[in-house]
Image (cartoon, helix red, strand yellow):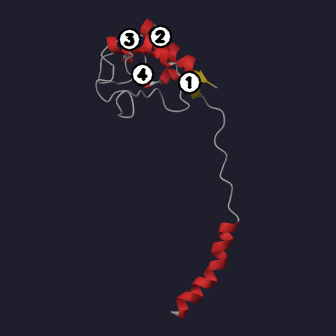
Amino acid sequence: MRGPMVVALIALPSVLHGCSSPTRPPDPPGGGQSMHLSFTQFDQTVEPILMNHGCDATGDCHGGGIRGTLQLSPPNAKPESSAILTEPLALAAGGTPHAGNKPFASTSDPEYQAILTWILAGVQP
């Protein structure tokens, strides 16, 4: 019994020393963008477009698996790379594969532009 007690007493100063001088964690990355999206603009402009094309969250669509959520884009990504824009965009116009339909033939489609405008209005440096 005395052996383990001696080992514990010998190791204790090094454990305490390790805890007495913690290192400062690195600073979080600076810059980047935050999103402050307008629900009113979404409600009046974007949701009718989504509903018109059957993309109004009737399943676990557009992000996280929680009904009613949209995943716009990964952090620090360009707004134009948002899945809500690339998935309904024709592949020939730079769209990404999507199980649903492809209502936007090009990035100049007025509905594509309306969604992009909503996203860009919410981007804040």
The amino acid type found where label 2 is placed reads Ala
Query: Considering the image in quadrants, where does the C terminus appear?
Result: top right
Assess disc 4: are there few (<14), some (14-19) or many (≥20) residues with their C-alpha within 10 Å of its C-alpha.
many
Q: What secondary structure is found at the residue carrying circle 3?
A: helix
Q: Which of the two labelled residues, at mark 2 and mark 4, occupies the earlier sequence position? A: 4
Residue 7 sits in quarter: bottom right
Task: Give 5 or 93, whichever is nearer the viewer.
Answer: 5
Residue 53 sits in quarter: top left
Q: Name the residue under label 2.
A: 114
Q: Mark 1 points at which residue?
A: 36
Q: Are marks 3 and 2 in contact (CB under 8 Å)?
A: no
Residue 80 visible somewhere in the drawing: yes
Going 67% across and 46% down the picture, which residue do you hit?
27
Q: What secondary structure is found at the residue carrying circle 2?
A: helix
The amino acid type found where label 3 is placed reads Pro
The amino acid type found where label 4 is placed reads Ile
4 relative to 55 in the view: left or right: right
Label 3 and label 2: CA atoms lie apart by 11 Å
Label 3 and label 4: CA atoms lie apart by 14 Å
Q: What secondary structure is found at the residue carrying circle 1?
A: loop
Label 1 and label 2: CA atoms lie apart by 16 Å
Q: Which of the two labelled residues, at mark 3 and mark 2, occupies the earlier sequence position? A: 3
Residue 54 place in picture, x, y as percent: 30, 16
